[in-house]
Image (cartoon, grey):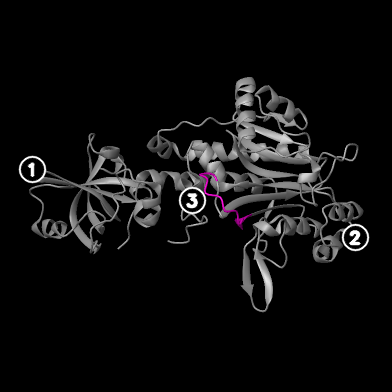
Amino acid sequence: MNKELIKDIQPEKDGEIVTLGGWVESIRDIGKIKFYLLRDVTGTIQITLLKNAEEKVKDALKEVKRHSVVIVKGEVKKNKIAPGGVEILPSYVESISSPIESIPLDPKQPADISVRLDFRPVDLRNKKNWAIFRIQSKIVEGMTNFLNINEFVQVFTPCIMGIPSESGAEVFPIFYFQKNAFLRQDPQLHRQLTILGGLWRIYDIGPSWRAEPSYTPRHLTEHRGCAVEFAPIKDESSTMKLEELLVVNAYKRVFEDCAEELEILEIKPEIPTIPFPEIRFPKVYEILKEFGKNIPFGEDIDRESEKLISDYIKEKFNHDFVFLNRFPSKIKPFYVMYVDEDPQWARSVDLICKGLELSSGGQREHRYEKIITQLKEKKMSLEDSEWFTKFFKYGAPPHGGFNIGIERITMQMLDMKNIREVTLFPRDPTRLVP
């Protein structure tokens, strides 16, 4: 029996016979009339059981509970007061599955997020969660469509590393036959090697892991990103121009396709204007000092600093986004390009949105001799890094990129307070199931 999508049942179909499948979200009994709200992945529709309905239909619906999965066949009727201006008068009902226990969590009622995550599959039935993940899907679609149109190739880099890609303190070791291995922190190094292979415009969407014992509303141990790498570039400004276009296209796609979802969440995010503001170090220190925040010259900034910088940008430029550029080179990984004329600074860029870092990127060092020098400065093993560095002996174009967090851009676009709200099944230091 072919089933239609609820979103396709419009008042123009008045009088047609359709077949639908979905969850029973709610049941209302008003006198001799019953209303069943049926939901599928595209929306909800009212099933109206009138007192003169056939007995076999009444008998079938007697067995239906909230959260039952049903198939309904019936006539489409215009009804201005029904959700979406239309209802279904059923002529056939089949219950596919019904709860055998009481639902442990009412998805229509507020509950602590830890409880909701314990019962996440039930929690996801809440229409606000449905809206969040529809929007997240469109964010990714907006980014990938933009990249595809601009001749970027989607690639799939390894998630298992033979050595830690950045810091050994923040990686997850895994059992890999008789060898040591690690879950990747970022697809960074393999993206660069792919550039060296001649694929000069690539993107990789996938997971990364960081073994940080952080319990904040902003951190996960497993997260997903849209990682972009391309060549040739002029300098780190090329990566910034591409990234702001990528973000704008993500916002535009949400605005074009998610009006209903934004209405459910009661939010109206604004499409950011281009260009995004940029602040370079050491100017960052000067601005923070105006707020009474003193960061030692040459040191990294903290979460509070990112929030203060965002407040400054909002007041001065009325913008939610800002690029922080030219970070101190001593705090950055060996593969980042230093500024030749002033090597205490690196061509390293973070994108901040409303006080939260969305991505890190910039220009990579493509000169073999410089890479080796920087490895030595970081006191890293030349032997352990040779699997990566040796390919730069054969010529490499100036290149760069970034990795923008999918959960984080969703969180900031929707003004969510906890990143777990926008993560299907979050992983943090205490949560491994469901």
Q: Give the percent coordinates (x, y) of residue 331.
A: 76, 45
C-alpha separation, residue under disc 3 versus residue under disc 2: 41 Å
Q: Indicate which disc residue 423 carries.
A: 3
Q: Main secondary structure of the magenta part?
A: loop
Residue under the image location 71 percent in, 54 percent down: 188
Q: Which residue is mark 1?
A: 31
Q: Are marks 2 and 1 in contact (CB under 8 Å)?
A: no
How dense is the environment of label 3, judged by Cα within 10 Å: few (below 14), some, or many (20 and up)? many
Element assignment for label 1: loop
Give whichever of 5, 69 is nearer the camera.
Answer: 69
Q: Amino acid at mark 1?
A: Gly
How dense is the environment of label 1, judged by Cα within 10 Å: few (below 14), some, or many (20 and up)? few
Q: Which quadrant is the N terminus positioned in?
A: bottom left
Q: Amino acid at mark 3?
A: Thr
How dense is the environment of label 2, judged by Cα within 10 Å: few (below 14), some, or many (20 and up)? few
Name above or below for residue 293 compared with residue 92.
above
**Mark 2 or 1, nearer chain start:** 1
Q: Give the percent coordinates (x, y) of residue 351.
A: 66, 38
Q: Which residue is mark 2?
A: 393
C-alpha separation, residue under disc 2 versus residue under disc 1: 81 Å
Q: Is residue 198 magenta?
A: no
Instruction: From the image, state whether disc 2 or disc 1 is nearer to you.
Output: 2
**Mark 3 or 1, nearer chain start:** 1
**Mark 3 or 2, nearer chain start:** 2
C-alpha separation, residue under disc 3 versus residue under disc 1: 42 Å
Residue under the image location 37 percent in, 51 percent down: 116
Q: Amino acid at mark 2?
A: Lys
Instruction: From the image, state whether disc 3 or disc 2 is nearer to you.
Output: 3
Q: Which residues are drawn in magenta?
A: 205-218
Q: Is residue 211 magenta?
A: yes
Element assignment for label 2: helix
